[in-house]
Amino acid sequence: MAARDDRALSGEDRLIAKYFRPLARHPGALGLGDDAAFITPAPGTDMVLKTDAIIGGVHFFPDDPADAVARKALRVNLSDLAAKGATPLGFLLSLALPKDIDEDWIAAFARGLAEDAERYACPLFGGDTDRTPGPATISIAAFGSVPEGTMVLRGGAMVGDIIVVTGSIGDAALGLKLRSGAQWKLDRVQREHLLSRYLLPQPRNALSEALRTNANAAMDVSDGLAGDLAKLCAASDVAAEIEVARVPLSDAAKAVLADNPNLMETVLTGGDDYEIVCAVSPGKLSAFFAAAQAAHVPVTEIGKVVAGEGAHFRAADGKKLTFAHASYSHF
């Protein structure tokens, strides 16, 4: 995403200079005036690297507001940094845009991206722009830092740990169904809540330090709580026992489930929550909850780590739930 002397700019370079150079505030970005950028990690820290892409028609609707698309693209990456206990440092952006996307769309996209880059103290360092015959594709590579040797892994959960999840589960999956035409008895506030949770994730970066200092294992919930918790258990060589009645639900999700109890599987496996599931030892649970309260991030205890394998979700009568698909998968 390098931009040259303004007198010799191509159309692509002009767009970069006009809309994206203002986001490149870190000195190492070189004002997007070179082919690469640099960053010097603070002494005693590790770099945490993450990349995720969102694709029109897969992760967002083509008519979604451009500024919201930009925010979602950055926030899904920030969510992973949060789960690793990392502080954001910056990101790289690659845009592949179809011909029907005009400069007004790009201007709105850049505006939303700039606002979130400032909000999360995560400046742009560079990237690439291309045309594509396919749907719009936005790929972001985000990087953060943690004190050396302290990144929170998937593989640290231990038998006896408590399973905790942030926020509420299932809203985004239900929001997608609503956006796709589902007809449920919801009031305006409930509808808007579900739709916004799908459109605009709320990464839990305010909880990063608390996770890093208290959690034995963590990961962000992007492909569904059931499937992602199973991945954490596999990496840790343990199992989890979850009480479904304790899984936190929004008022909107409860309203949907009241008339459509069969959608509990969608809630637990549908994905796009961008919450964090973690394993915390009992001795650190009070400190973790206090830190979460101070960070204004809701957290809920939903189960425990046990010996064995897999993530087992149990109904109020103790019966184990089975799912057709434990998590969302592109393949």
Image (spheres, helix red, strand yellow):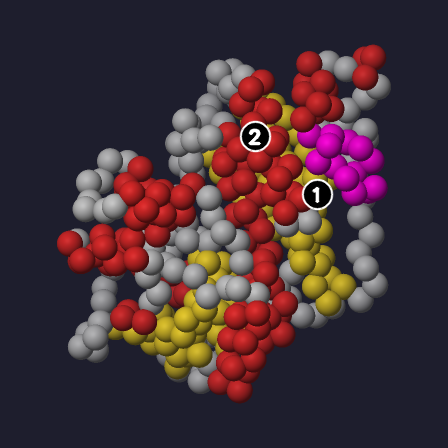
Q: Quick one: SS at disc 1?
A: loop
> Is any atom of residue 58 visible in this view?
yes
Q: Observer-nearest residue: 56 or 182?
A: 182
> Is any atom of residue 312 visible in this view?
no
Query: For the point 51% across and 30% down, which residue is it?
Result: 66
Label 1 vs label 2: CA separation? 15 Å
Q: Is 48 within the magenta?
A: no
Q: Observer-nearest residue: 318 or 189?
A: 189
Disc 2 residue type? Phe
Place of residue 8 in the rendered image (x, y in percent of width and height, measured from the top left) = 81, 13
Residue identified by numbered label 1: 123
Magenta region: which residues? Answer: 20-32
Residue 254's place in the image compared with 60, above or below, is below
Query: For the point 49% across and 59% down, which residue is it?
Result: 220
First in residue order: circle 1 vs circle 2: 2
Residue identified by numbered label 2: 109
Disc 1 residue type? Pro
Magenta segment, prevailing SS (helix, strand or loop):
helix
